[in-house]
């Protein structure tokens, strides 16, 4: 039997959701500029965190920090990519006002 999608096509869950009913979704009908800005915000935060790590000395770092940092980078980057994909699809289907 085919399962029903709990969201209409308008709402797309983020890939980083780990639950059966995804609490974080993208409104695919939102303003594409707003979707793009949300994507850029996450990718920028990920990039800045990577830049900080690149400049750090890990002599006094804790090995337990590595999974925390990589998890934060994964969430930021994946959410940003999901948002970029929606923004791209919206912009490719965009039609100029008459």
Image: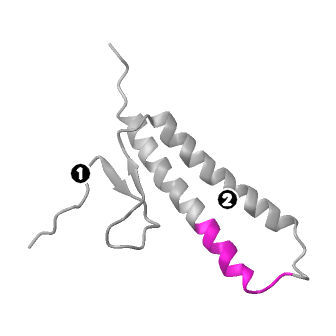
Q: Secondary structure at mark 2?
A: helix
Q: On residue 46, which mark appears?
A: 2
- At horizontal 51% and vertical 58% (from top left) the residue drawn is 79
**Magenta span dominant secondary structure:** helix
- At horizontal 40% and vertical 38% (from top left) the residue drawn is 30
Of marks 1 and 2, the one in the foreground? 1
Q: On residue 8, which mark appears?
A: 1
The question of residue 68 being in magenta is answered with: yes
Task: Give, as a single range, the part of the protein colored magenta.
Answer: 61-74
Q: Nearer the viewer, residue 87 or 7?
A: 7
Picture layout, residue 32 above or below residue 10: above
Picture layout, residue 94 above or below residue 25: above
Q: Taking 68 as reference, is 85 left or right?
A: left
- At horizontal 74% and vertical 63% (from top left) the residue drawn is 50
How far separated are the C-alphas under marks 1 and 2?
Answer: 30 Å
Q: Secondary structure at mark 1?
A: loop
The question of residue 23 being in magenta is answered with: no
Q: Quadrant of residue 98?
A: top left
- At horizontal 84% and vertical 81% (from top left) the residue drawn is 61
């Amino acid at each position: 039997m085919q399962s029903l999608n709990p969201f209409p096509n308008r709402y797309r869950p983020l890939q980083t959701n780990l639950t059966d009913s995804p609490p974080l979704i993208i409104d695919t009908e939102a303003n594409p500029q707003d979707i793009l800005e949300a994507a850029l915000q996450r990718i920028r935060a990920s990039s800045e965190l990577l830049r900080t790590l690149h400049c750090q000395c890990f002599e006094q770092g804790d090995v337990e920090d590595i999974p925390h940092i990589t998890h934060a980078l994964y969430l930021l980057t994946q959410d940003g990519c999901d948002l970029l994909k929606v923004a791209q699809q919206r912009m490719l289907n965009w039609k100029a006002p008459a």
